[in-house]
Amino acid sequence: MKRVFPILGLLTAGLLSYALYLALVVAPTEQTMGDVQRIFYYHVPSAWTAFLLFFVNFIASVIYLLRRSPKADIIALVAAEVGVVFCTVVLVTGPIWARPVWGIWWTWDLRLTLTLVLWLIYVSYLILRRFSTSGQTPQLAAVLAILGALDVPLVYFSIWFFRTQHPQPVIGGGGSIDPRMMHVLLINWAAFSCFAFLVFWSRYRLEVLKRELEDTQALEDLLESPRSVR
Amino acid sequence: MTYLYAAYAATWIIHIVYVGILVGQYSKLRDEIKNLNERK
Amino acid sequence: MSLTGVTLIKDLRLEWRSKDAINSMLFFALLVVVIFSFSFDPTAEESRQIAGGLIWVAFLFAAVVALNQTWAREIRNQVLDAYRVSPAPANSLFLAKASGNFIFVLVLEALMTPLFVVFYNLRALGPAWQLPIVALLGTWALVVNGTFFAAMSLRTRSREIMLPLLLFPISLPAVLAMVEATTSILTGEYSAKFWIVLLAAYDLVFTTGCLLLFDIVLNAE
């Protein structure tokens, strides 16, 4: 396992560099927005990745409540954390894109607002995990994750209707997309997915190690004799 | 366009900061494990 | 009589006897209205546009203050353990608490509303009969999740800040709906129908969710 990681890391770095080259050089320039539109190739894959990770968190939380498997709990935690990181990228690149194009930093664009609400929900999830003093923190967190996930369609519809009543600029670029642009988008998406996977894997291993250490320390305190950690 | 480079830079800064935090926590854990093993 | 009913009546009776909590919250609600009125002093035309948002933010503040002490009495008297070991379903306790909060927050709103009408010279240009429906659905949305998250926050550091921290993000679609519905009724420019339906859907989803999941929260120690 340990030898695979550096190889995958190098491959991912290569893919990311290639994807960057495609985004900056190869992709055709957009008619109305110009070069700024290239932010699209980072903004959209980050959003897809974040949403996928939040979905993983939901599934893992459900599995945890059904089976009480510690692995499911760790996956839920890691998915939420990495998801928040990618979500932050979406929320930062969105306004940077909006400003030169629309002259405003923020608009209640459907995707951007949904991303903001998701970011808030999952940050509150992470804060609960950190601040909880209960022995059943994984259960409480899983419950919160499920309620949060139930909220998502309601958030979507509320924003969608709000925008039909109060029309606002659209940031993501609606309408059909040039196939060459789609190609660059998909390559960037693949690259960021690989990157997300590696970050996820690292954080997973870190959490496993942390818990092993905690268990060992707890056991040691209990028995008052030194023990080794693998 | 400065905005374009700002967006790309911001993306990587965020990712590097997070990975940096992970690396820091890894080394902290390694040290603690070493302490635990040495005490044995 | 059902356990829910008994618990609810007990809570209401206790609240009525210890008037401290009620009085301080009423006064807090009044203060909120006055401060908002100082800060935003619009013309009659403008006030209809923003009053919806202002009123619901004020209600939200008042609700959080009320929600924060939902379980205080249970904690003080170590009653929660008794509930855990009793054969009564956890739902009844939750429903009783949520209903008690619901009634209480509605009372606060009923007192704050006339003040807002006075300070902002409010008059609904749309169908005013829809306003109580919005108030009931919206308040229940806040209270059902608020009671649930208040229980969740019991075993956390910074308990009082944890409740709004958990409640606000998840309540955003409901708050949007409440505000938009109220504004559309006040201005008479749009129909509030969609927002009312959304609030009803929100209430249905989260009442079900909270009822199903409360057992886990009650048993977390």
Image: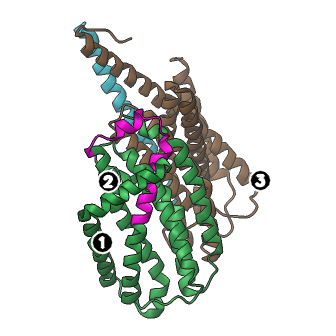
Residue A180 percent across, percent down from the top left: 74, 52
Q: Which mark is residue A179?
A: 3
Residue drawn at point x = 56 percent, y = 20 percent = A4
Q: Is residue C216 left or right of residue A60?
A: left
Tell which subunit mark 1 falls on.
Answer: C
Residue A51 percent across, percent down from the top left: 59, 47
Look at discs 1 and 2 and give the one toward the viewer.
Answer: 1
State whether the magenta stretch is mostly helix, strand or loop: helix
User: Badge 1 is on which residue?
Assistant: C26
In three-dimensional space, the C-alpha distance between marks 2 and 3, rounded to whole angstroms, equals: 49 Å
- Is circle 1 on the same chain as circle 2? yes
Would you say residue A101 sits in the magenta stretch? no
Q: Which residues are magenta?
A: C76-104
> What amino acid type is highlighted by mark number 2?
Ile
Would you say residue C90 sits in the magenta stretch? yes
Letter of the chain shown green in the rendering? C
Q: Is residue A20 visible?
A: yes
In three-dimensional space, the C-alpha distance between marks 1 and 3, rounded to whole angstroms, equals: 62 Å
Is A107 placed above or below C219 here? below
| The C terminus of chain C - image quarter | top left
> What amino acid type is highlighted by mark number 3?
Pro
In three-dimensional space, the C-alpha distance between marks 1 and 2, rounded to whole angstroms, equals: 21 Å
Q: Quadrant of residue C165?
A: bottom left
Letter of the chain shown brown in the rendering? A
SS assignment at label 3: helix
Letter of the chain shown cyan in the rendering? B
Look at discs 2 and 3 and give the one toward the viewer.
Answer: 2
CB-based contact (under 8 Å), mark 1 and mark 3 = no
Question: Which of the two residues, A208 or C168, is positioned nearer the viewer here?
Answer: C168
